[in-house]
């Protein structure tokens, strides 16, 4: 019902004996009018939905849960304990943005003597949704109904992210094992544990964000990052980094900390200008049990990989605005990751037209987003409805991605191919999904790329 042949708005519905269960309910992101149309009408029979399984806190998976609450949904939302904590920050921030966007738009509409619009959802709707969350530990099997059991595995994608094993018993002696492998992380990323493998699957729903692409080795990323910082500082410019508040910001800060410690980059000020990212970093510090051993030990010993003397956190609006007046080199990390809203828009507006500056892209940019237009180096882009010339250097570093690449995805499928009957390829642009599906077929496994609204009987 979403997140197919695109990377936003993930939503899948499972029906068993007349009962419905939803996996994820993410915000669709893209053209404003299209996004509004899709997000405000989820096309769900809400009274029939017994519960929701939430894979992780990213907004393209969790961000439309408050809309369900606004429409009257009051049943449990099952997710990991860490995702409960992260969603508390993420969904409140999303509601704040929805309210502010509507307020900003209504000022324009009032001038044009047009009727006002309501926010997609409000803070009250977000709080109503958060009240439905039920925290579950990894590998703690829980029942959604007499026929449906679920077990969550570490996805290694972001803190608290989960792959879901859904076992369905419907008259069969052996349960049908469906694996929800969206989003799948990468092995040996900074501070996260590696993704876990779910064996003996009959069916699999798998992402394809990088279904036909390979990542650079992460071991080379710090050298490349240092080069970008050093050459930008040499020309007295700023490095502007649009970053997802959850995970990507913390990875960038962690990497800059490592480079700063090794004296591989100049001691320029580093600003984290995202109140949400700051709040999420605090949540990271509360969950050392979720990190790989090196980072876990650092936290337990009182050493902070997310805070060092060169980094400054800008919480207030005034602190954020003061960054526009900076004349010396600096690194500014800000949300949103796809440049669709938030404080990053102000930093782009003030820095995009100077060739001294660098826009460093460290995450996936969906089609039709401002971030994608920057990646494609369009000569002019619109920010707050006004045209700006793209003169800053644009650097794309996909090695920071928290998504598995083509080889990782095919390897995951191949490890359980003997039992697999079919794989559904989702969460990717059409070319990436089709390419991954073809690769899965070459493994001898049936693969299918669904469209929105498609149904499959298992």
Image (cartoon, rainbow, N blue to C red):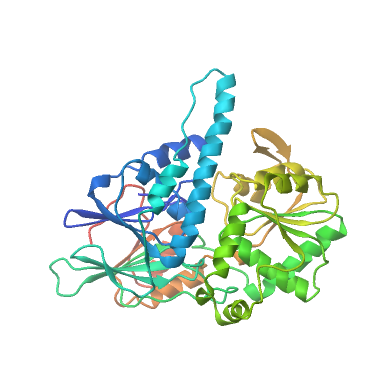
Q: Residue 10 at x, y = what percent?
A: 41, 53
The answer to whether residue 456 is visible is yes
Q: Residue 292 at x, y = what percent?
A: 55, 78
Q: Tell which of 264 and 246 is nearer to you.
A: 246
Outermost residue, top side: 113
Question: Would you identify the image quadrant in which residue 105 lies?
Answer: top right
Horizontal relation, residue 211 to residue 320: left or right: left
Horizontal relation, residue 308 to residue 423: left or right: right
> Vertical placement of 55 versus 7: above or below?
below
The answer to whether residue 4 is visible is no
Name the residue rendered at 51%, 55% in the picture: 89
Which quadrant would the C terminus be assigned to in this image? bottom left
Name the residue rendered at 55%, 43% in the picture: 368
Q: Residue 438 at x, y = what percent?
A: 42, 63
Q: Tell which of 267 and 190 is nearer to you.
A: 267
> Vertical placement of 227 versus 91: above or below?
below
Horizontal relation, residue 20 to residue 439: left or right: left
């Amino acid at each position: 019902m979403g997140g197919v042949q695109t990377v936003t708005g993930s939503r899948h519905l499972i029906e068993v004996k007349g009962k419905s269960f939803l996996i994820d309910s993410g915000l669709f992101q893209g053209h404003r009018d299209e996004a509004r149309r899709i997000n405000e009408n989820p096309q769900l029979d809400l009274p029939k939905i017994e519960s929701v399984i939430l894979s992780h806190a990213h907004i393209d998976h969790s961000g439309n849960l408050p809309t369900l609450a606004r429409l009257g949904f009051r049943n449990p939302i099952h997710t990991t304990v860490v995702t409960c904590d992260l969603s508390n920050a993420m969904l409140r921030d999303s509601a704040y943005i929805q309210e502010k966007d509507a307020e900003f738009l209504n000022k324009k509409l009032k001038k044009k003597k047009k009727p006002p619009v309501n926010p997609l959802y409000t803070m009250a709707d977000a709080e109503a949704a958060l009240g439905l969350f039920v925290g579950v530990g990894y590998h703690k099997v829980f029942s959604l109904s007499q026929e449906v059991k679920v077990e969550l595995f570490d996805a290694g994608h972001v803190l608290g992210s989960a792959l879901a094993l859904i076992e369905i018993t419907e008259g069969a002696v052996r349960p049908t094992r469906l694996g929800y492998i969206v989003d799948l992380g990468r092995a040996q990323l900074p501070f996260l544990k590696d993704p876990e493998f779910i064996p003996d699957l009959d069916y699999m729903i798998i992402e394809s964000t990088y279904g036909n692409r390979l990542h650079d080795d992460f071991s080379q990323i710090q050298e490349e990052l240092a080069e970008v910082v050093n050459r930008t500082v040499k020309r007295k410019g700023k490095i502007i980094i649009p970053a997802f508040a959850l995970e990507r910001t913390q990875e960038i800060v962690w990497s800059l900390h490592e480079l700063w410690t090794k004296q591989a980059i100049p001691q320029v000020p580093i600003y984290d200008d995202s109140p949400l990212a700051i709040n999420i970093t605090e949540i990271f510090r509360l969950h050392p049990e979720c990190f790989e051993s090196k980072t876990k030990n650092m936290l337990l010993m009182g050493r902070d990989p997310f805070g060092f003397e060169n980094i400054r956190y800008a919480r207030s609006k005034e602190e954020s605005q003061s960054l526009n007046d900076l004349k010396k080199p600096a690194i500014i990390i800000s949300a949103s990751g796809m440049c669709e809203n938030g404080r990053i828009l102000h930093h782009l507006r003030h820095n995009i037209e100077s060739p001294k500056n660098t826009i460093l892209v460290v995450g996936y940019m969906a089609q039709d987003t401002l971030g994608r237009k920057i990646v494609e180096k369009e000569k002019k882009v619109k920010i707050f409805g006004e045209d700006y010339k793209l003169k800053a250097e644009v650097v794309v570093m996909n090695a920071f991605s928290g998504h598995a690449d083509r080889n990782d995805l095919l390897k995951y499928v191949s490890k359980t191919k003997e039992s697999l009957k079919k794989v559904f390829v989702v969460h990717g642009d059409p070319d990436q999904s089709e390419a991954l599906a073809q690769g899965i077929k070459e493994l001898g496994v049936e693969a299918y790329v669904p469209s929105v609204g498609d149904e499959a009987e298992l």
